Image (tube, rainbow, N blue to C red):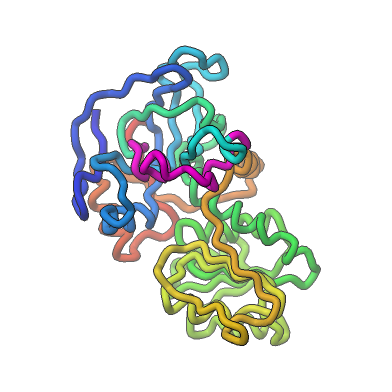
Amino acid sequence: MRAFRLTGPGTARLDEVATPVPGPGQVRLDVLAAGVCRSDLAVLERVEALGYPLPFTFGHEICGRVAAVGPGVPEFAPGDEVVVHAPVGCGRCDRCARGETNYCDDGHESGATGFGLGLDGGMADAVVVDAARLVPSAGLEPAHAAVLADAGLTSYHAVAGSLSRLAGEDAVAVVIGVGGLGHVAVSILRARTRATVVAVDIREPALELARTLGADRTATLGSGAGEVRAATGGRGADVVFDFAAAQSTADLAPSLLRKGGDLVIVGSGGGVVPVTKPGSLPAGSRVRLPFWGSRDELAEVVALAREGLLPVRTEEFGLAAAPEVFDRLRAGEIVGRAVLTPVR
């Protein structure tokens, strides 16, 4: 079968590999769709620092159809369509038992962060995963469902942790970076809160997408502070979600925040926010660094999507186009989420 694999630092290619066979408690999926994330670019460029074993297949946003079932898997059968909860943990601790493998203290034991992040993932014709990681996705388009596994789940988890800050009638949320994750966050804020949503990006197509998804105001980086002042009467936003976290956005985000608000840093752009007292952060600020989400939260995200409350923008490509898609993502030419469709 074909697989788009990271073979060395900065080197990835489409290879022919053996089709995997599911063991006890596992299933083999024919991959219907696999999302392409900016974190894939980061792994490609920083794999030595991350310490992931090589080679492995990219793809941590996976929607597939069950093709084969290993022993001890009564709950799934060939033909079932599912999405994969991809973060891995030790499998022994209380957090793993609750499906919170994203916050396992000993997850580093495997040398990987998740499927497609150190373990063979879904940018392939097929992938083998534990059945306990699967969430049924029947009724959703595969490209839509795949995006929910990270862009949807991470955004949902980020918003869920700050819902208490967004409960007021006059609450304001800012989304910086309307990319693969940020555009889903706009939809989640619309679905889960009554907050005024201000979307900030440097690209007009991304801002237009934010308006389509229900953002109340949009702004460039240069005009973001003015839009937030106008939306809040000068007090600042209750929550600022930074989905880019480059230095330019890290410099902007604290200036948009009101006293007692949340700064939620979701992106991994390398920007630095000094935490000093006094400093750039308003009094009473809370800084959060959410990472992915739990399996139960993924099920909640899928349920919202089935209700039509989580529209996503996808652009689909064949598996052979993976190198081109990585280049386009690096150049900022993808609006929404790029998705590879190996088997349809």
Judge from the rendering whether residue 268 lies leftward or rightward of residue 135; answer left or right.
left
Q: Position of residue 68 (x, y in %)?
A: 41, 17
- Count the labels in the image: 0
* Residue 98 image position (x, y, % from top left): 63, 37
- Compared with 294, 328 (above or below) is below
What residue is shown at x 21% (from left), y 53% (from top)? 9
**165 is higher (above) or lower (below) than 49:** below
Residue 72 belongs to the span the image colors magenta: no
Q: Quadrant of residue 42?
A: bottom left
Residue ranking furthest to the right: 169
Image quadrant in which the C terminus is located: top left
At 67% from the left edge and 84% from the top edge, which residue is drawn? 230
Q: Does residue 302 appear anywhere in the picture? A: no
108 part of magenta stretch: yes
Which residue range is magenta in the image?
Answer: 97-122
Residue at left 51%, top 63%? 209
Front-lying residue, 121 or 344: 121
Quarter of the image with the N terminus in it: top left
Horizontal relation, residue 108 to residue 21: left or right: right
> Where 260 sits versus 267, above or below?
below
**Closest to the observer, 318 or 58:** 58
Question: Measuring 45% from the left and 67% from the top, which residue is drawn there?
Answer: 244
Q: Is residue 119 visible?
A: yes
**Is residue 9 shown left or right of residue 238?**
left
Front-lying residue, 207 or 280: 280
Name the one closer to the observer, 200 or 291: 291
